[in-house]
Amino acid sequence: MRILLVEDEERIASFVARGLKESRYVVDVAADGEKGLFMAEINPYDLVILDIMLPKQDGISVCRELRAKKIDVPILMLSAKDSTDDKVRGLNFGADDYLAKPFAFKELLARVQALLRRKAPEKGGVLKVGDLELNQLTRKVSRAGKEIELTGKEYALLEYLMLNAGTVITRTMISEHVWHEDFDSFTNVIDVYMNYLRNKICKGFKKTLIQTVRGSGYIIKA
């Protein structure tokens, strides 16, 4: 899943982005409110982590504008302030959760997972297509009971396919959800990773779950 982190403190942004990437999320970073708002408007994020105290445009107004424009992406707000009034203010303007600084990354990750779990079509965050299972909490993937080791990018690609099982997914859709904002859509990287994934998910099994739809993209189905 793809996350936008809007945080102007470079040390915190680097720490959080690194931890999320290690947890197999795709992360874009914006260092001010204006850029964060622009990125959230043009990219299909699964979650926005939004600091309140930002240059150019504060987090509260960014949150308010996103909701006014009917962008219903889950928003986790961060703030150095920990008063009840600040929490209520952020939640009243459309935020889904609130975390005060300083925080342990473990707690932030738990809140991120809880917000993303609300979007998961399967109870408990377990996605299933035939005998293929992906656990969004443990990040474990298995087929017919056999655990499959994936790289971070392979996992992100498979998760996106499984979240949209039975639907044709175009290369443009994949680039928007699985790769970073500066991804070069004219490369063949998506096809290369899809082949890597197919070899791990389908090789040695009777049924090929991931199929190419010529001229359109890819689909995963049982």
Image (cartoon, helix red, strand yellow):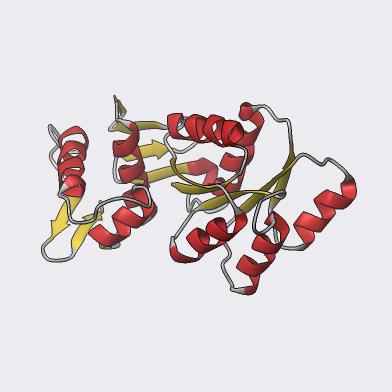
Q: Would residue 6 appear left or right of 20 to someone viewing this image?
A: right
**Residue at x-position 23% and y-position 56%:** 185
Residue 131 falls in image quadrant: top left
The total number of labels drawn is 0
Residue 70 falls in image quadrant: bottom right
Looking at the picture, how far across and down is residue 207, in whole percent? 15, 44
Q: Residue furthest front?
A: 56
Q: Residue furthest bottom?
A: 69
Is residue 57 visible to us here? Answer: yes
Query: Of residues 134 and 94, which is closer to you in this image?
Result: 94
Looking at the picture, how far across and down is residue 55, in whole percent? 66, 52
Residue 92 falls in image quadrant: bottom right
Query: Of residues 27 and 219, which is closer to you in this image?
Result: 27
**Residue at x-position 59% and y-position 73%:** 69
Query: Of residues 127 and 111, which is closer to you in this image?
Result: 111
Query: Of residues 170 and 100, which is closer to you in this image?
Result: 100
Is residue 170 visible to us here? Answer: no
**Residue at x-position 56% and y-position 47%:** 31
Q: Would residue 56 appear left or right of 201 to someone viewing this image?
A: right
Looking at the picture, how far across and down is residue 66, in whole percent? 61, 66
**Residue at x-position 31% and y-position 38%:** 153
Q: Would residue 84 appear left or right of 118 to someone viewing this image?
A: right
Q: Is residue 40 above or below residue 25?
A: below
